[in-house]
Amino acid sequence: MLDAVVVGAGPNGLTAAVELARRGFDVAVFEARDTVGGGARTEELTLPGFRHDPCSAAHPLGINSPAFRALPLERYGLEWLHAELPMAHPFPDGTAAVLSRSVAETAASFGPRDAGTYRRLVQPFLPRWDTLARDFMSLPLTALPRDPVTLARFGLVGLPPSTWLMRRFRDERARTLFAGLVAHVMAPLGGFATGAVGLVFALAAHARGWPVARGGSQAISDALAAYLKDLGGAVHTDYEVKRLDDLPPARAYIFDTSPTALARIAGLGRYYDGYRYGPGVFKIDYALDGPVPWTAREPRGAGTVQIGADSAEIGSALRAASREGHAPDRPFLITVQPSVADPTRAPEGKQVFWAYGHVPNGWTGDLTDVVERQLERFAPGFRDRVLARATAGPPEIAARNANYVGGDIGSGAVSGLQLLLRPKPSLFPYSTPHPAVFICSSATPPGPGVHGMSGHNAAKAVWRRLRQT
């Protein structure tokens, strides 16, 4: 009998398997697709030689993850590559604000009236970032806080809505960039704890940047799988699980799946019926005949570029997708240009690039023209650079990854109490009513992102249970 079986070979499932194998448990992973990866894959979606990431591409939480940093993933081929700037946010007037590794450079891009405000906001937390990240990403009680005072101070700043925090800024440049940071988790700007979301992304950039993985996000998953195999764990692909009886006998079963899939497979009935899924995304992967022709200088050297004219436009786009049930006319776009840091991702002189905007969950329309009109506002002539595009709306995204129900790449709404207490309000979110069944996907704390911490935290709950039996 195996000690543990993991269902799903995304970063969280693989991390959970690695953590258990490191402690001497006999572990096997079962994945429905023909390769490991989940939300961290790399494929030729457009033209030969253009290597795209169907989901995550830039990884501020990955390079800052306490779980990944504790593993020898660089020995298995993972190399982080950095653009000149982690992120830039252009404006319609041809200027841009930036999120730089340097706090001073970032603050200066906001203008003199907000530079000091921004420095005072982030500087107290940076010297304690590693401990804060570990404490924040281990909530709830998978580990006692190492620095409860700093965590409490962070909570006082971050738990109110981001709109409260943004009132500290006097000018629109800082408010717009910060609103864009919050929008990465598709949360309405006025939601509970959204201030913390923006702060985490900003602090992560100042601490270690927003890198891409050399060769593509698949390198993260491949490194985890290779390390697991060296530890004696097994990985089985092309193995679809429809019920627990499809799996070999084990003392524990850990699911890197959506809560609804887990309930169906494990026979938990309506246990997760209250779990809410959030907006979907419409994503376009591009093969380009050269760099994006940004009007502003700063985005040309940035790995990630946020697109939204001002905080009101960003807020309106989020409301349209999450509350009003329609696609926005001017979507907030997250764009990533991996070729700026990793020229090997495309043939010489060419680039890969992607952009996505938020749409209602399950939306079936085509946002291509709207997205490209938005891009042309800040990069005139963009369409002339397009060699090929691969589009994916919510149905295609859900078909590609079953965890992304209705195209929700966050694996659940990141709003209200569900931002912190997911998939149900509980101090033990990785456990289920079945004593041998656990969940470790992004539907559990700390939530979306390629960081492995949900798997790391779930593995703690599992090995504590295994030690008792």
Image: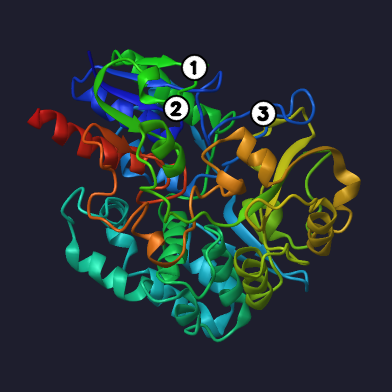
Mark 2 lies on residue: 9
Task: Please report the residue visible at 81 percent of the width from the left and 51 percent of the height from the top.
Answer: 368
Q: Which residue position holds label 3?
A: 344
Left or right, 202 with respect to 391, comes to: left
> Which badge, 3 or 1, is on the more N-terminal residue?
1
Instruction: Tell which circle, 1 or 2, labels the residue nearer the N-terminal end.
Output: 2
Q: Amino acid at mark 1?
A: Thr
* Spot occupied by residue 237 in the image (x, y as percentages of width and height): 49, 17
Q: Are marks 3 and 1 in contact (CB under 8 Å)?
A: no
Element at label 1:
loop
Depth check: give the residue in front, 229 or 119: 229
Colouring method of the image: rainbow
How far is disc 3 from disc 1 in space, using C-alphas?
27 Å
Q: Which residue is drawn at the image coordinates 50% and 76% (left, top)?
A: 190
Q: Is residue 83 visible?
A: no
Task: Please state which of residues 162 and 149 is positioned toward the viewer in this rendering.
Answer: 162
User: Furthest residue to the left?
Assistant: 468
